[in-house]
Image: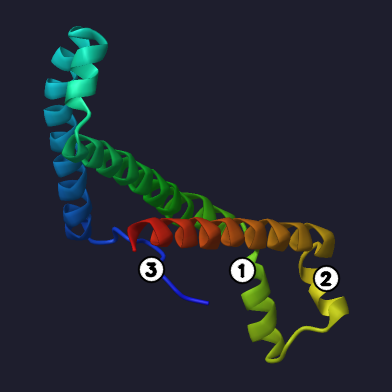
Amino acid sequence: KESFADSPYYNLWFALPDLLFVVLLWNVLYAEMKEAIPAAMNGLDGIKDYLKLWNVIDWITIAFGFTTVSFWMVFVLKVSGELPQELADLPSVALDLAVFTNRSYLTAEEFDGVVDRLGFETQMSEIFRCAEEVAQSHIVARRFIF
């Protein structure tokens, strides 16, 4: 298991390397398109002449780069948007108040008196589902990055 920041861009300066990476990726794509479009206009022979080793490597780099950015953005949107919203819907204030008032853990009966158990279990299932999605998207993004 591993951990990660709950908000990767809590300081906007942390987004600068990622933004620079995307700008450089777009630059490579633009340069390749400037070569590929005229080559394609020359027909099949132009495409065959264009598809040399380094141009193929450039296209592989572009494909993997945008794939990595896509997976990273899915992770950022889940960890910064969906998961906090799921956590915010929990009845934390009511449960905290009940625990502090009781000065002990709540029994099952006391818990049922504070919140609807079935609704709470449904919320927790949704949180665990969302957290698992966040963890899986982080794993996929990390595999592409490293």
In the displayed structure, 137 sits above or below 109; it is above
Residue underneath mark 2: 113
Front one among 6 and 53? 53
What is the CA distance from the residue labelled 3 to the residue labelled 2?
35 Å
- Residue 92, label in figure: 1
Residue underneath mark 3: 5
Query: What is the image's colouring?
Result: rainbow
Residue 110's quadrant in the figure? Answer: bottom right
* Label 1 Cα crowd, 10 Å radius (few <14 / some 14-19 / many 20+): few
Apparent side of residue 78 relative to residue 113 in the rendered image (left or right): left
* Local secondary structure at mark 3: loop
What is the CA distance from the residue labelled 1 to the residue labelled 3?
22 Å
Front one among 108 and 11? 11
Residue 42 horizontal/vertical position (percent): 18, 8
Residues at circles 2 and 1 in contact by the CB criterion of under 8 Å: no
In the displayed structure, 7 sits above or below 32; it is below
